[in-house]
Image (cartoon, helix red, strand yellow):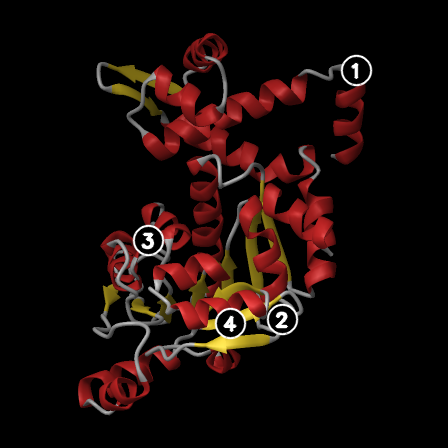
Amino acid sequence: MKELLELQKKLVPDLLKVMEARYAILQCIDIFQPIGRRGIAENTGLTERNARGEIEFLGSQGFLQLTSKGMYLTKEGKIMRDQLAFYRSEWTGLDVLEAQIKEKLKVNHVIIVPGNSDEQETVKQEMGKACVARLKKAAQPGSTIAVTGGTTMAAVAEVMTPLGGEDDYLFVPARGGIGEKVENQSNTIAAKMAERAGSSYRLLYAPDPLSETAYQSIINEPSIKEMIHVIKEADVVVHGIGDALTMAERRKTSKAVMSKLKEDQAVSEAFGYYFNASGEVVHKVRTVGLHLEDLKAANQVITVAGGNSKGQAIASYFQQAKGDLLITDEAAAEEILKGM
């Protein structure tokens, strides 16, 4: 396969560019359908003229259905999109990049999707699809799946599908809410994932962060205590990684703590822990739910984070934290290698 791709690059250098453009269109329609030509151009980075030509070709091959509301993928279009996705890491060279990141971060498995999720929402959706595909393999019937909040996790929820026939799964939030947009909170995301997967969910009603007094009071409430036990026994954990200062601002962190984070050069945040570039914990906030040490008990820990802005944060987190699988994008991977 690789030898054939190398020959194609030399003999027909434009072929892979055309395949990439057509894949991007199929992917975009799959995510946003029904969608018009202008929407496709905006989400793929193609000009409207180029998009129109490629759309006409894909339609003539029976991959698209054009309606008054917009375009949809046909059954044949979905099959073609999936087949292209299977071979895409090889023709883009991402399999080499995956091996490099795996070695640098000492993580068991790495999946990299092309692009930069800071700039294209479709890239974030593609990471979400990779996460769902992995969940279908990792989650056993009856598994409890704990998920954190954030925009990346919300993207995973958007593309969630049933994980395995008639099997039921329990989705739970990994932690309390931090007072951000409701659609990005872990409770909302857990419920949405469960709904789309045709499974069950339970919610955790607790703010994040908490004072020491409030924390001790809340965790001793019978209902909260029982829910925390369920969360800590999760079989699979799916979480994102945040930029340290961005997360601190979202938590309405005090000026004193913010100054400390800057002084200690905090880079990343996950589960209420703030890490510097060496992976050392420089600050921790009181949160109800999963803590870093609880990840050791999970059968599978899936980390989903991407974008050029998250490269250093991802590298920082993996200096010492557990992660069985990292799903990221090309921009973040290149930033990780550059930083290390």
Dot 1 or dot 4, earlier in sequence: 1
For the point 36% across and 16% down, the residue is 38
Q: Is residue 179 left or right of residue 160?
A: left
Residues at badges 1 and 3 in contact (C-beta under 8 Å)? no
Q: Nearer the viewer, mark 2 or mark 3?
A: 2
**Dot 3 alpha-carbon crowd within 10 angstroms: few under 14, some 14 to 19, many 20 or more:** some
Residue under circle 4?
Answer: 260
* Residue situated in front as seen by the camera: 175 or 196: 175
Residue under circle 1?
Answer: 11
Tell me which amino acid carries mark 3: Pro
Dot 3 or dot 4, earlier in sequence: 3
* Residue situated in front as seen by the camera: 307 or 76: 307
Q: Is residue 334 left or right of residue 180?
A: right
The CA span between labels 1 and 2 is 46 Å
Q: How far across and down, in percent of the image, does residue 66 sit?
A: 30, 15
Residue 162 disc label: 3
Q: Nearer the viewer, mark 1 or mark 4?
A: 4
Dot 4 or dot 2, earlier in sequence: 4
**Dot 4 alpha-carbon crowd within 10 angstroms: few under 14, some 14 to 19, many 20 or more:** some
For the point 51% across and 61% down, the residue is 303
Residue 279 disc label: 2
Dot 2 or dot 3, earlier in sequence: 3
Residues at badges 2 and 3 in contact (C-beta under 8 Å)? no
Residues at badges 1 and 2 in contact (C-beta under 8 Å)? no
For the point 42% across and 74% down, the residue is 235
Tell me which amino acid carries mark 1: Leu
The CA span between labels 3 and 4 is 44 Å
Q: How far across and down, in percent of the image, does residue 280 sit?
A: 61, 75
Residues at badges 4 and 2 in contact (C-beta under 8 Å)? no
Q: Is residue 62 left or right of residue 266?
A: left
